[in-house]
Image (cartoon, grey):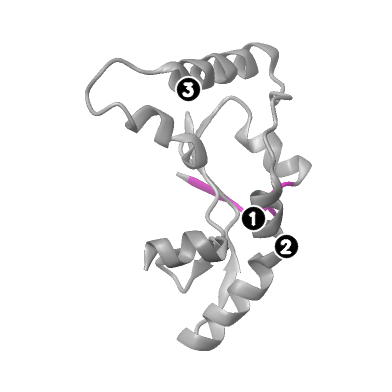
Amino acid sequence: MQWHDVEQNTEAWNELRTGKVTASQFGCFMANQGKAFGEPAKKYALQIALEIIKKKKSENVYFNAHMQRGHEQEPMARMLYEIQRNVDVTNGGFFDLGDYGDSPDGLVGSDGVIEIKSVTAPVHFATL
């Protein structure tokens, strides 16, 4: 495993992710509980195969208002976590495991990671 100190959503970060299955999409492979892969997994596998062939990141970028909200609120959420837990959160970078990669939202100490989710109030209350 190799760690790269890159910021998420940058050109360098996208280059590292090209042709790799990433943690953010791994759920589409896990969702079928032993059954054959569904359409989301097949589409994602095709996207990864094309990235490997073309040596270029796919242009199929999905982004919605909830994701935008999460990006905007992430710095505040990180700061609140640091204050409440009395820890420092550093850049999560990109963990490269060959065909697989992961970009946690931050690193906590020498052995922790953080994934920040800024959900809407209805989603939050439903979770509680």
Q: Residue furthest right?
A: 11
Residue 109's x, y, as percent?
A: 46, 74
**Sequence order check, earlier mark of 1 and 3:** 1
Question: Label 1 vs label 3: CA separation?
Answer: 30 Å
Question: Label 1 vs label 2: CA separation?
Answer: 21 Å
- Judged from the image, the secondary structure of the residue bearing numbered disc 2 is helix
Along the viewing direction, whichever of 92 and 82 lies nearer the viewer? 82
**Sequence order check, earlier mark of 3 and 2:** 3
Position of 16 with respect to 44 (left or right) is: right
Image quadrant assignment for residue 112: bottom left
Residue 38 highlighted magenta (yes or no)? no
Q: Tell me the residue that label 2 is attached to.
A: 72
Q: Amino acid at mark 3?
A: Pro
Q: Tell me the residue that label 3 is attached to.
A: 40
Position of residue 56 relative to residue 126, above or below, is above
- Quadrant position of the C terminus in the picture: bottom left
- Judged from the image, the secondary structure of the residue bearing numbered disc 3 is helix
Q: Amino acid at mark 1?
A: Asp
Instruction: Give, as a single range, the part of the protein colored magenta.
Output: 2-9
Q: Residue furthest left?
A: 34
Q: Amino acid at mark 2?
A: Glu
Residue 5 numbered mark, or none? 1
For the point 25% across and 19% down, the residue is 35
Position of residue 64 relative to residue 100, above or below, is below
Position of residue 43 relative to residue 106, above or below, is above
